[in-house]
Image: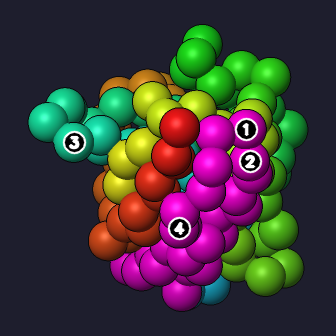
Amino acid sequence: QVQLVESGGGLVQAGGSLRLSCAASGRTFSSYNMGWFRRAPGKEREFVAAITWNGSSTHYRDSVKGRFTISRDNAKNTVYLQMNSLKPEDTAVYYCAADRGWVPELIYEYDYWGQGTRVTVSS
């Protein structure tokens, strides 16, 4: 069992930055691949970024490449999402999720989810 708690969301102006954190409970965190997803108002949840259990590989949706960076610290049981050059279209609730496998964009592959943290980007 893995419990996930996101933090770091907030209100930021376009062009600004935020760093989201996802703290995991349990001693098996380092065996999970981790992903970030988001749900914008009125839209379906969508994949944002993912990282393998050891950080050796990452994957991003096209619209955030070059602006967002996913990373993890297994000693702290935490995964991060550094978001730079934020745009109003990045406004959403952001969720982290844990997956034993590696099909990073498939929502239903993920076993555990956090409650989300809200990011609002003003123009």
Q: Residue furthest front?
A: 123
Residue bearing the label numbered 4: 10
In the visual, does 90 lie left or right of 46?
Answer: right
Residue bearing the label numbered 2: 16
Tally of numbered discs: 4
The span picked out in magenta is 1-25
* Callout in the foreground (1, 4): 1
Instruction: Point out residue 110 in the picture as x, y percentages from the top left corner.
Output: 36, 47
Mark number for residue 15? 1
Mark 3 → mark 2, Cα distance in angstroms:
20 Å
The tag earlier along the polypeptide, 3 or 2, is 2
Considering depth in this image, is 37 or 118 the residue closer to the camera? 118
- Reply above or below: 75 against 107: below
Which amino acid does the dot numbered 2 rest on? Gly
Mark number for residue 41? 3
Mark 3 → mark 1, Cα distance in angstroms:
20 Å
Mark 1 → mark 4, Cα distance in angstroms:
14 Å
Q: Residue furthest left?
A: 42
